[in-house]
Structures are given as structure tokens and as C-alpha cells.
Image: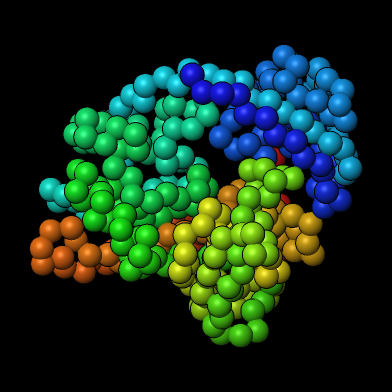
Amino acid sequence: MTESEKYSFELSPEEGKNRLDRYLARMFPDYSRTHISHLIEEGFVRVNEEKTPKPGTRIKPGDRIEIEIPAMVVPKVLPEEMDLDIVYEDDRLLVVNKAAGMMVHPAGHIMSGTLVNGLMAYCAALGDELPARAGLVHRLDQDTSGILVVAKDYNAHHYLARQFERRTAMRRYAGLVAGVFELDTGRIDVPVGKDREHWPRMKVMGAEGKEAVTEYEVVERFAESTLLSIKPITGRTHQIRVHLAWFGHPILGDTRYGMGNRYNTLVGAFSRQLLHAQDLGLCHPDPPHEYMEFTSELPLDFQEAVSVLRQGKRPSLSPE
């Protein structure tokens, strides 16, 4: 049993008018809209200090929302048979290609259908030796696709995780962003931290934030957007998305960080953020610690978006 969590924030002018349940579901992606609706109906949500019994209540900029997420008993994570896209595997590690829309590990009320559930069924030892995260060394956002490395034992996990901590592991992402970049290469070096007013969002901060560095290179320019090769030097939560949105070029499809700018329509034309973990390079945990590099092809929805933009077309809005 964990303690309940309480959050309070005020809607900014960029948020516009919205339904209460829809807004909170976007703010707390680990919880379904149905679960959020239950919290509202049970009195765990207040708007402007008033309990709001209806999930469909309309909210507007300036409204202050308070939400309490009750403590809950966290059930045991169970293995689930699923089709995993295994890129590489040996006795110490495996590399998997995660699909967009799949959560990496259980969180909140979501205890099934995650990559961890599938990994525990695929390799039973992961649930025994590394039960908390089934050997995950790093993570990807739910709607970000691409490559992840998984350790099969504690020693391998320690060796691989140390490479991410020391920034010797190479990660490269493909990202479609709104707007046309002028420079072919660049570096964004601004601290990132938790947005206390709009948690669980992150934001660019001053000295109180944590160091965050992202490098990018233009791969292809389109009429109103750009295909980038993106290399995060540090690994802060939502770093690439936050940095590029702050830079004025949000990831296409990223409704959390891409709202409230002149590319709003273009950003909202895609069903998910078009960010893909394409390349991963690291040293194997066994001597002689051979350097290994893995590549994941762009998924179909990403390829289709590139094709549409390459033809000079403006994508039509996806239905809600």
C-alpha cells in the first residue's frame, strides 16, 4: 500500500477549453479515462475548490484543478504471452523493438499488456532475478517506438546501466518535427525539470533543473516540417520532446508538448508522436566487451507520414 498522491495545477491560456476527464487523462497517461472518470465521480477531483461530480464538466484557462489519486495495493505483475519483436538475443541480454502504444512497464492501474508482462513470459528468469522491471535498462515513452536493451541478470544489468549513466551508450532517434530547420546541425543545452504546475509534464527550467543536452541533424526538409536524426546526450524524462517543443519545433503528433503554437494543426494531424528510437550502440557485458550496434527500421505509420510530407501534402486531421 502506497500513500495517496495529490496534485494541484492551473490551466494555462494555451490549454484552451476542454472536458475535465479528457484533460486529466492527457495529464495522467498512466491512467485510463474511465479510471479518471471514477475519481471525479467519487469526489477525488476539485475545480476551483468545488467538488465536480461530472466527468464532462467544461474547464477553461485559469481554472485550478486539484486531484487526489488514492493509495492502492499494487498487484503482482504477471507474465503474458505476446508477440515480441526480438532484434538480438544471447545468454546475457536481448534487444527488443517496442511498438508505439505499448507501455514499457506497469504503472498506476495498468498492470497488463506492457512490455514487461511480455518479457516475463518470454524469459521466465527475468521475473525471478529482476522482478521489478524484468531487466529493463532504459525506457521509452508509451507512444515512442523503437529499440530497447534488456539485461538477463543482475551483473549484466549493472554493466549496461552504467554505460547509460556514464553516457557511453549511443542512442539515436528519428523524429518528424513541425517547422523547417535552417541549420543542418545543432545542439540544445538547457536544463529540464518537473513542471509543478502541470505535473506530470516536464519543462525547460533555469538552474533548478537538471542538465539536459540534445543534438540533432537534419535528414530531410519538407514544406512545413523536418525529419531529424536526434541524439540525446543526457537521458531526462521526455527530454527530446520538451527540448524540441521549447525550440519551436515540436514532434509531430505530440499533443502534450506540441499545443499552443502556430504548428498546432500540423502537430495534431497524427495519432501518436512521431519519434522512433532507431539506433542503439553499447558494449557487451562479457569480456572483451565488444561494441555492438542495433538498428530498427521506421515503423509503417512513420514511413507513411514521411511519404505524405515528401509529396508536399498537408496531412489531414486524424479523428479523435
Quarter of the image for the C terminus: give it: top right
Please provide percent x and percent y for residue 122: 23, 35
Residue at x 87% of width, y 23% of height = 50
Q: Is residue 108 visible?
A: yes
Q: How many marks?
A: 0
Q: Closer to the camera, 22 or 215? A: 215
Using the rendered view, name the quadrant where residue 31 is placed: top right
Q: Is residue 280 left or right of residue 252?
A: left
Residue 85 pos. (x, y %): 30, 47
- Position of residue 243 measured from the top left corner of the image (x, y, whole percent): 61, 65
Residue 86 drawn above or below residue 56: below
Side of 91 relative to 200 (left or right):
left
Residue 179: x and y, percent? 69, 72
Q: Residue at x 60, y 38 (%)?
A: 29
Q: Residue most toward the top?
A: 42
Residue at x-position 53% and y-position 29%: 108
- Residue 84 sits above or below residue 183 on the image: above
- Horizontal placement of 149 versus 55: left or right? left
Please, which colouring scheme is shown?
rainbow
Q: Is residue 97 visible in the rendered structure shown here?
A: no
- Quadrant in the picture for residue 112: top left
Q: Quadrant of residue 4?
A: top right
Q: Residue furthest left?
A: 287
Residue occupying the point 36% across, 60% down: 164
Which residue is at the front of the view, 315 or 113? 113
Outermost residue toward the bottom in this view: 183
